[in-house]
Image (cartoon, rainbow, N blue to C red):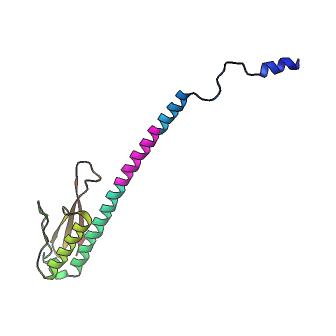
Amino acid sequence: MSGQIRRAIKEPTGHQRGVSLIEVLVALFVLAFGMLGIAGMQTMAMKANQSAFERNAVVISANSIAERMRSNLAAARTGGYNRTMPTGACTAPSGTDRVSVDTSRWLDELNRNFGTTACGAINCAGTPAFCRITVRWDDSRVANGGAAQTFEVDVRI
């Protein structure tokens, strides 16, 4: 009887052992497709991170000119810092008075951080002065096709 049990447990001949080459190729294809998806998500995450970094820098830059305006209240409240957003190139004022120097340094800061297409505008009105600070920069690395981004902040001087 023990001989019959051994023969029943013994594997039948002709069955395959291990994996076939087709199974390995399918597994590699699925793995490669998944890795491409992960690489695409990583690229999008890096672009979004760059955009968030630039938006944070714009907020800091807008705060920079707001603080400069607060330190020169008389000029800010009378509209001395007011400037419109140009449609073309952004040119900084060339004067030596405090408003021109503050504005010029702010625009130079924008150009250093965001490239030569970056520009800013300021519009103050009322007493106390409510000022809208606008910053425009090129966010083409994030948005396909080159998208100009605009950030506006309202401050009270």
Report the magenta residues as a range: 32-47
Residue 13 vs residue 77: left or right?
Answer: right
Displayed quadrant of residue 100: bottom left
Which residue is at a point 41% across and 46% down the rendered structure image?
A: 39
Q: Main secondary structure of the magenta part?
A: helix
Q: Nearer the viewer, residue 20 or 80?
A: 20
In the displayed structure, would residue 1 be above or below residue 93? above
Residue 4 vs residue 138: left or right?
Answer: right
Image quarter (top left, top right, bottom left or bottom right) of the C terminus = bottom left
Which residue is at a point 88% across and 17% down the rendered structure image?
A: 1
In the displayed structure, would residue 153 be above or below residue 70? above
- Inspect this view and state whether residue 128 appears: no
Residue 131, position in %: x, y?
Answer: 19, 70
Residue 25, position in %: x, y?
Answer: 50, 31
Q: How many labels were placed on the picture?
A: 0
Q: Residue 139: within the magenta?
A: no
- Inspect this view and state whether residue 153 appears: yes
In the displayed structure, would residue 24 be above or below residue 134? above
Q: Residue 46: within the magenta?
A: yes
Which residue is at a point 23% across and 48% down the rendered structure image?
A: 145
